[in-house]
């Protein structure tokens, strides 16, 4: 799914991706439309600009960036298995980090070639973080900074009470449906908590979650 508020750019990118064998299931012109449409088409990857508004009106740039970040959060909450690849004219460090904190998998600037873009979309679909050269070092440095407390000891990621509860049940071997029945929530809500926990802990699968739970004394 391609999201951009500039129609020529949006349709051009969708056409270029389609001509190279990628299935573009939908496009959206603003953040609100993206959050509404994505659950209906369930894309593997959402390729989206960060500078978005609800219309083409004269909103301040920082507000449009904030709207784009909120759209990432909204899509990730509804579709935890969908990956977000930002394609933006902005290479500002704060914009990159805000997008990643909201749940984006990767970040490219719009100077990328079509070949680079196609490769990035394919790798993002596989769960590989992709960044424009120069941004990867920034991201790695930020993660290293956040991973250390003032004393130099690794910081313990802040999980919510519900995320911790779900983690305990995952470590016991329960499926998402079984956990949902026990907690009286939908299995999709459970999967959302699992994905959020994986992101916070920088882990990749349930096996690593179980290992983490055991190491932290959350499960036998």
Image (cartoon, rainbow, N blue to C red):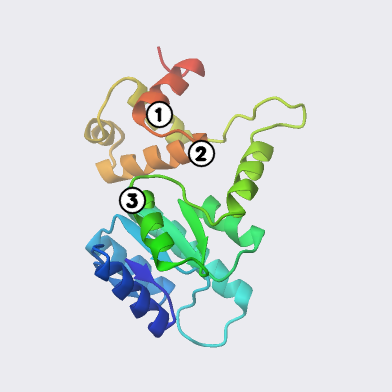
Q: Earlier in the sequence, mark 2 or mark 3?
A: 3
Classify the position of the C terminus by image quarter: top left
Which residue ends up furthest to the top in the rendered image? 220
Q: Tag 2, which secondary structure?
A: helix
Vertical comparison of 102 with 206: above or below: below
Q: Secondary structure at mark 1?
A: helix
The residue under label 1 is 167
Give the residue pinned by disc 3.
125
In the rendering, at what x and y percent does residue 199 appear?
A: 47, 40
Is residue 148 toward the left or the right of residue 42 in the image? right
Q: Position of residue 94 (x, y in %)?
A: 65, 59
Asked if the residue at tag 3 contacts the one at tag 2, i.e. Cβ–Cβ closer than 8 Å, the answer is no
- At which x and y percent is residue 185? 29, 42
* Badge 3 or badge 1: first in the primary sequence: 3
Q: Is residue 41 left or right of residue 157?
A: left
Q: Which residue is mark 2?
A: 200
Residue at horizontal 60%, vertical 29%? Answer: 156
- Residue at point 45%, 16% (across, down): 214
At x 31% / y 67%, what residue is drawn?
Answer: 17
Q: CA distance from mark 1 to mark 2?
A: 12 Å
Question: Residues under labels 3 and 1: Cα distance?
Answer: 25 Å
Q: Of 30 and 204, which appears nearest the observer?
A: 204
- The quarter of the image holding the N terminus is bottom left
The nearer-to-camera label among 3 and 1 is: 3
Q: Crowding at label 2, few (<14), some or many (≥20) Cα neighbours within 10 Å?
A: some
**Above/below status of 218 relative to 99:** above
């Amino acid at each position: 799914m391609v999201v951009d508020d500039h129609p020529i750019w949006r349709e051009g990118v969708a056409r270029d991706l389609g001509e190279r064998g990628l299935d573009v299931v939908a496009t959206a012109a603003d953040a609100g439309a993206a959050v509404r449409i994505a659950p209906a088409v369930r894309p593997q990857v959402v390729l989206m600009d960060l500078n978005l508004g609800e219309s083409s009106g004269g909103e301040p740039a920082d507000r449009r960036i904030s709207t784009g970040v909120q759209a990432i959060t909204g899509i990730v909450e509804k579709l935890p298995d969908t990956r977000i690849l930002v394609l933006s004219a902005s290479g500002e460090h704060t914009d990159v980090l805000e997008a990643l904190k909201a749940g984006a998998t990767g970040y490219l600037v719009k100077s990328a070639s079509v070949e680079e873009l196609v490769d990035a979309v394919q790798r993002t679909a596989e769960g590989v973080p992709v960044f424009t050269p120069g941004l990867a070092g920034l991201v790695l440095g930020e993660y290293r900074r956040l991973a250390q407390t003032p004393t130099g000891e690794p910081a313990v990621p802040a999980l919510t009470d519900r995320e911790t509860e779900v983690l305990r049940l995952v470590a016991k071997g329960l499926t998402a449906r079984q956990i949902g029945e026990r907690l009286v929530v939908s299995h999709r809500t459970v999967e959302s908590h699992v994905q959020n926990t994986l992101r916070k802990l920088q882990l990749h699968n349930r096996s690593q979650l179980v290992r983490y739970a055991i190491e932290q004394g959350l499960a036998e």
